[in-house]
Image (cartoon, rainbow, N blue to C red):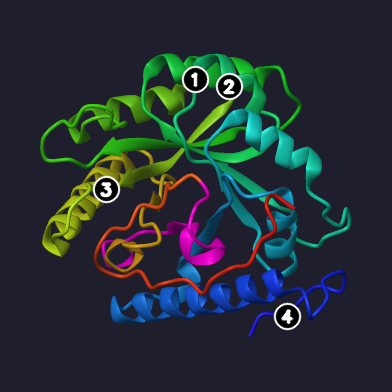
Amino acid sequence: MSVLGASQSADDVRTAAIAANLDDARAAIAAAARDAGRDPAEITLVAVTKTWPAQDVTRLFGLGVRDFGENKAQELTQKVNDCNLPADAATPIRWHFVGQLQRNKAKLVAPHVAMVHSVDRAKLITALDTAMAAVDRESLRCLIQINLDEQRVPGRAGVLPAEAAALADQVAAADHLEIAGVMGVAPHTDSLDDTKRAFDRLWRASQQIADQHPAATVISAGMSGDFAPAIAAGATHVRLGAVLLGERRIGEVTSEPGGGFPPRPVQCKSRE
């Protein structure tokens, strides 16, 4: 069971509900890994906290979570400033940018994130490299976002699998960036078989990139509704939001088939 941090009261209803959801998520991830013949320790849970307040980040941090995902640059920077986290934590927080990033916002995320999951065009690579050159930190790990639809769907981000290797080469050639692997979002479908085929396409693309860049082993795939087939297909990072924090305030939950579980209701007073 998760242990509440010293600053979190046992009668904090929201913290207790999040803790229970987190225990369920960790157990389900471990079960999916074992079913796939994998070590659960290979799987990193990225808590997607977009639209939720900084207090929820602090709660999850106190429960042992260290990887957090945001999809908007301004919200990310605000949460970095607002989170009340211990400065002397043995394992510091790691921020992941998981949404579509505009080139002019690269300078906002560069000082803070450990990994950008959504690199999908050459101009963004240039913008991130330029932004990183202006900050005093190590190279930024980048994932190539791959479009997993069998046919192009308007508004869906990511490059075609055939285009991913060339983009990975460009990341690797940048002075301040590191190619770390791939990311994908399964198509909107009620078919588990379609979901499995999509994640298989992602795995094959990851292998093509890893053949040229052996350190690029990250596969970011799987959300609240489809993390089990993602893990079966080799995912190293799963991005979970709804099953940890409850339904999104703005109706953003993606409910894909094949592995999610319903979250406990999480009580929240407006935005706290």
Residue 79, quarter of the rendered image: top right
Label 4 to label 2: alpha-carbon separation:
36 Å
Q: Which numbered disc, 4 or 1, marks the residue that appears first in the sequence?
A: 4
Instruction: Kindly state the secondary structure of the residue where label 4 is placed.
Output: loop
The answer to whether 61 is drawn above or below residue 114 in the figure is below
Distance in Å between CA atoms under marks 4 and 1: 38 Å
Count neighbours of disc 4 (C-alpha within 10 A) and say few if under 14, some if 14 to 19, many if 20 or more: few
Q: Which residue is drawn at 88% across and 57% down?
A: 88
Residue 132 lies, in percent from the top left, at: 64, 23
Residue located beneath label 2 in the image: 106
Disc number placed over residue 102 in the picture, else none: 1
Q: Which amino acid does label 3 sit on?
A: Gln
Q: Which of marks 4 and 2 is in front?
A: 4
Q: Is residue 58 above or below residue 146?
A: below
The circle on residue 3 is: 4
Q: How far apart are marks 2 and 1 (CA)?
A: 7 Å
Query: Which residue corresponds to mark 3?
Result: 207
Q: Which of 153 and 184 is in front in this view?
A: 153
Please state the horizontal and vertical placement of residue 221, each as a whole percent of the image.
36, 53
Characterize the local packing of mark 3: few (<14), some (14-19) or many (20 or more) Cα atoms within 10 angstroms.
Answer: some
From the viewer's perspective, tell me whether residue 132 is left or right of residue 230: right
Q: Which amino acid does label 1 sit on?
A: Gln
Dot 2 and dot 1 residues touching (CB under 8 Å): yes
> In the rendered structure, which segment of residues is drawn in magenta?
231-249
Between label 2 and label 1, give the one nearer the viewer.
Answer: 1
Residue 168 is marked as none
Q: What residue type is labelled 4?
A: Val
